[in-house]
Image (cartoon, rainbow, N blue to C red):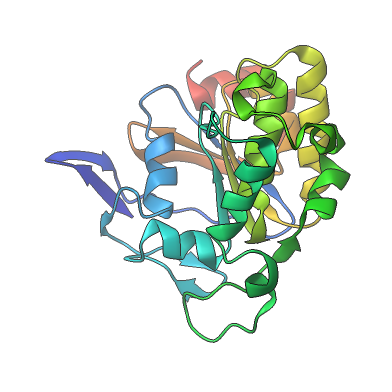
Amino acid sequence: MNTFYGKSHILHDVGMEVRAGEVTALLGRNGAGKSSTFKSIMGLAPTASGTVRFDGKLISGLTPEQIARAGIGLVPQGRRLFPGLTVAENLRLGGLSRGGGKAARAPNTGGNASGAGVHWDQERIFSYFPRIRDKLGTNADLLSGGEQQMVAIARALSGNVKLLMLDEPFEGLAPAVVEEVFKSLDQLRGEIAILVIEHDLDLVLALADRAYVLDRGHVSHTGPAEPLLRDIEFRKQVLWM
């Protein structure tokens, strides 16, 4: 796909594949085009050419709301919870965007209807993020940074989701919380596909199965994550960092 911001060509023939049951890392320096790739997938930055397919269906040209209902959950950088609302209210809003609850279990009657993916009700979410069970009545802005990140992931999962996209999920978290979130994401791979942007390379490469590297809007490398994790010199060659 190719994406422009005005006359600026941001993404140049970017192609990638995210597989079910895997964690795929999207790596690169600041300004490489990582967040723009997420925005293009979600319809927030419409592509000028190229196609995006999800679960065999064309989603290019759909609105962000339709793409979310198709089964893609996005956790943006900075979490972006609704601060005046409780944890429970934030989770309900996430479910509404995908026809959560009874609507999410209805048959898929059209290309944009919900129904694909795992149905993530609250009990299922609590099995991965038990800490937020006791915070349902708390306003989101009163939570710790780690708790806010867990709620942001839980909100993205609410409803029917097959692909979870995370932009800097470990940013600003205490080491103990990083370990907790890492463990939850590692367990989630068995249920859904995960695409993640993260600057902590040791962390994300330990989590990921495969990695794509962007350099000034071009895919400069693709391959398994383990060689980048184990071989620091190879990592420097590939990532220039």
In this rendering, the answer to whether 88 lies above or below 116 is above
Residue 85 visible to an observer of this rendering: yes
Q: Is residue 185 left or right of residue 98?
A: right
Q: Residue furthest left?
A: 7
Residue drawn at (28%, 55%) of the image: 47
Residue 83 vs residue 81, the one in the foreground: 83
| Location of residue 228 (image quadrant) | top right
Residue drawn at (62%, 57%) of the image: 95
In this rendering, the answer to whether 47 lies above or below 143 is below
Q: How many marks?
A: 0
Residue 167 vs residue 105, the one in the foreground: 105
- How far across and how far down the image is residue 17, in percent? 54, 56
Residue 228 visible to an observer of this rendering: no
Residue 171 vs residue 16, the one in the foreground: 171
- How far across and how far down the image is residue 176, in percent? 82, 16
Residue 78 vs residue 229, the one in the foreground: 78
- How far across and how far down the image is residue 233, in percent? 62, 17
In this rendering, the answer to whether 72 lies above or below 236 is below
Residue drawn at (83%, 38%) of the image: 133
Q: Is residue 70 left or right of residue 233?
A: left
Quarter the N terminus occupies: bottom left
- How far across and how far down the image is residue 4, in percent? 21, 44
Residue drawn at (65%, 60%) of the image: 159
In this rendering, the answer to whether 82 lies above or below 94 is above
